[in-house]
Amino acid sequence: MDALVALCKRRGFIFPGSDIYGGLAGTWDYGPLGVMLKNNVKKLWWKRFVEDRDDMFGVDAAILMNPRAWEASGHVGGFADPMVECKKCNSRFRADQIGSQSKDDKSWKLPDACLNCKAKGAWAPVAQFNMMFKTHVGASQDSASVSYLRPETAQGMFVNFKNVLDTQHPKLPFGMAQIGKAFRNEIAPRDFLFRSREFEQMEIEYFVNPKAWEKTFEHFLEQMHGFIADVGLTKAKVSDFEVAKEDLAHYSKRTIDIEFEYPFGKKELYGLAYRTDFDLKQHSEFSKVDLSYYDEESKERFIPHCIEPSFGVDRTVLAALTDAYTEDSLGGEGEKRVYLRLSPNIAPYRVAVFPLLRNKPALVEKAREVYKNLKKVIPNVDFDDNGNIGKRYRRQDEIGTPYCVTVDFDTVEKGTGVTVRDRDTGKQERVKIEELVGYLRLGK
Ligand SMILES: [Zn+2]
């Protein structure tokens, strides 16, 4: 994991947030390569779940919402983690992460000593800590101006349910989809991008007649695994975890966590929940706006039920990076090679083009031409003429570029095409320039 974090910084994927000021706990900044990777993940998701379907409506709701929405959703009252503080050094921990709670009398069993200062018996009582970031909207700082940075993107869709219904006139079943930032004031952010205080979600609220929820639930479970295959995660590292009835949130009838084998353990990657009509009912009650739906076929009026597939963008990026990080001996005698075995679907660059030598104008000119022509059809192409060819391969391997194309003297003098090198095997093949696009698209 440390090696991956170091690679991410060295190659410009991900930096600690506010790096030059010593960072800010729980925040990360995406650099040029990280943005490309993350955008590829988001594009893949949007295409599968919005563009390729006829029943999905995209929205982009505001991060700041009327605080009444968070009362209705239950976040003001209940969105809390159990927190325990050491009275000696004032370090704070998540009680459920360092200890466990008795199912019978709800008492907490905590380690004897503080994990930071090692003081014994210095724990203050476990308290509930609300994870929403509070802020003030407008110039006054009184309680009437309080608002929150959204802790999830879902509510921005529920509050727009009627707007979508009234403007698009969809028939059930239909869904709303959104990609956006969410914020949680985690007590103990950790595990790189896994648990951070600012993160991005891709969420769907899919509305159905309650009679059809089971079929829809199965459909989205399958779609979610389809997306995981698109991202290219190793299948054996992905598993479904059915949340036990007694552990379900009070509004949910069924929840499956899709888990991934991260280097720090098996953890939640995505979630699929049947949220019943809880959210629309709550918002209807708190806003006094009717959020029911009239079904013309059955002549029934009811509040639609909701299936929610929820995806973490950063958790996807982290899963892909940890899964892709590979070391082998392809570097040559006793030299270790590090490369990212990223799927061509999400790799920042699909292909890099080099002139064999940077000081031969004929080679550079031809390489530039190949690069420009490829770029017309494949958007993510890199051009690299720094250092020698071995260094370029090493760099492209480390950023996960599946193919490197080299223009050499034979390309220019004999017209015998270019050399294409495969990232994973290191094997090189001669490919005609006019066949290059097809080769790079179908090569994997
Ligand atoms: Zn302490």
Image: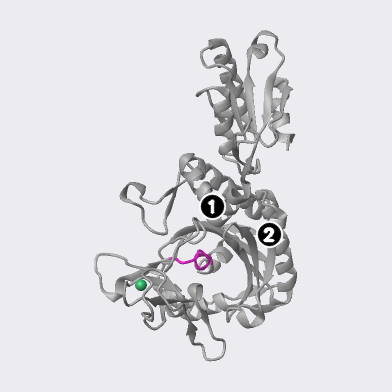
* SS type, badge 1: loop
Judge by depth and name the residue closer to the eye, 79 or 46: 79
Question: What residue is disc 1 on?
Answer: 1
Range of magenta residues: 150-157
Horizontal and vertical percent for residue 215? Answer: 75, 69
Ligand 1 positioned in quadrant: bottom left
> The C terminus lies in which quarter of the figure?
top right
Instruction: Give the residue drawn at x 53%, y 26%.
Output: 384
Question: Please, what is the three-letter code of the amino acid marked with disc 1?
Answer: Met
* Residue 256 figure quarter: bottom right
Is 156 a magenta residue? yes
Q: Is residue 309 visible to us here? A: no
| Label drawn at residue 27 | none
Judge by depth and name the residue closer to the eye, 151 or 9: 9
Crowd tier of the residue under label 1, counting other residues whose Cα lies within 10 Å: few below 14, some 14–19, many 20 or above: some
* Residue 346 figure quarter: top right
CB within 8 Å, label 2 to label 1: no
The span from disc 2 to disc 1 (Cα, nearest Å) is 19 Å
Horizontal and vertical percent for residue 291? Answer: 55, 75
Task: Look at the picture and state if 121 lies above or below 31.
Answer: below
Q: Count every numbered label the image shows and give the total.
A: 2
Horizontal and vertical percent for residue 57? Answer: 60, 58
Instruction: Give the residue drawn at x 64%, y 12%.
Output: 409
Horizontal and vertical percent for residue 324? Answer: 62, 46
* SS type, badge 2: strand
The verdict on label 2 being within 8 Å of ligand 1 is: no
Q: Earlier in the sequence, mark 2 or mark 1?
A: 1
| Label drawn at residue 238 | 2
